[in-house]
Image: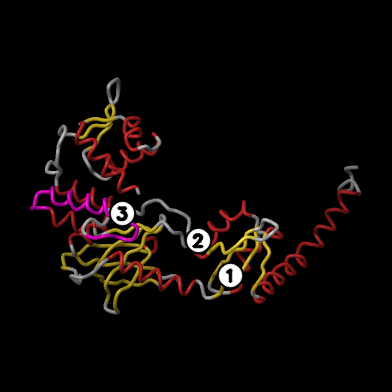
Amino acid sequence: MRADRLVAALLLLQARGRVTAPELAQELEISVATARRDLEALSAAGIPVYPQPGRGGGWQLVGGARTDLSGLTSDEARALFLLLGPATGPAPGTAPPLTSALRKLVRALPATFRADAEAAARAVVSDSARWGEPGRELPGLVETLQTAVVRRLKVRLAYTSRGGRSTERLVDPLGLVDKDGMWYLIAGTEAGRRTFRVDRIAEAGVTDLPAERPDDFDLSAEWQRVVDEVEQRRSLVSAVVLIEARHVRVLREQFGRHCEVIGQEDDGRVRARVAAQMALSIAEQLAGWGAQVEVVEPEPVRAELARIGAELVTRYAGQEAVSAEGSRSGGPAGHH
């Protein structure tokens, strides 16, 4: 877990004052490239960690070796806990030792900005399971929205819906979710809680109005509710397919969590179940596989594949015949 490594890297820097990427890699049993990315992530987030060039260089925690976090400023502590995630309660998939370590880090902070650090820790959830969307760079609005969540201030959004309709809304920001590079804002609205894709937010203005946030609000639990609702809509139809074992990884990347291996055939092929919103959606995703995937059931998916295949034959079979005839005759006239 990356949060575990970031905590370990920070504590190692506190103990030694300076460390190189190879030293960190050896201590944490990770690659040098991963260690360097973790150090760069701490530095980019605003933690006072800087590279020192030249012989005897490495990465240094400015201010010297420390045994606690009392040397961090309020902004630095908030940046750290935005990176680390939930620190005051167990999030799904969070190891108990990590949760305990994060609680200790919170207690080590000066009381004057401990609340901000705790709010920052609850402001973001990371979900690595894809919904068929490619990873994207961090949107510029995320930092603005994080600030609004931590400071509990209403945000005025200019938002474009999936259908292209533009609206303006005044919302109570409750938390942000990073789903494999796609960011979502969960917010309270006049119509209840809503989930907004950050890449569809054209503008976001933080106001001076206090935002309403239920005392018992749990971002991880709320996101799980959203995921369950979306997954139910996206998996209304399932199909059983046969595919060579070496292609299963690609099939899983294509269907995300809607791909489940359920057995193996005598010929070595893997039996898997894939799901989508409609039979047509499954057929469209499998059509590019050609004969490499065999759909066992249901019949509606097989029928959609047959229809797609027939359309392709109608469109391209005649062109292939003309092309083959041209090749046999030596090409266009005048070029024999």
Q: What residue did someone put label 2 on?
A: 256
- Nearest the viewer among 198 and 111 is 111
Q: Is residue 232 magenta?
A: no
Real-space Cα distance between discs 3 and 2?
Answer: 24 Å
Disc nearest the viewer among 1 and 2: 2
Name the kind of residue labelled 3 in the image.
Answer: Ala
Which residue appears farthest toward the top when viewing the image? 55
Real-space Cα distance between discs 1 and 2?
Answer: 14 Å
**Quadrant housing residue 274:** bottom right
- x 86%, y 47%: residue: 331
Disc nearest the viewer among 1 and 3: 3
In the displayed structure, 53 sits above or below 293; it is above
Q: Residues within 10 Å of mark 3 (few under 14, many from 20)?
A: few
Which residue appears farthest toward the bottom when viewing the image? 191
Range of magenta residues: 89-113
- x 70%, y 57%: residue: 267
Please tell me which of labels 1 and 2 falls first in the chain: 2
- x 13%, y 41%: residue: 71
Q: What residue did someone put label 3 on?
A: 95
- x 73%, y 65%: residue: 312
Q: Secondary structure at mark 3?
A: loop
Please tell me which of labels 1 and 3 falls first in the chain: 3
Name the kind of residue labelled 1 in the image.
Answer: Ser
Q: What residue did someone put label 1 on?
A: 281
Image quadrant occupied by the C terminus: top right
Q: Secondary structure at mark 1?
A: helix
Real-space Cα distance between discs 1 and 3?
Answer: 37 Å
Provide residue 165's location: percent of width, then percent of height.
Answer: 41, 73
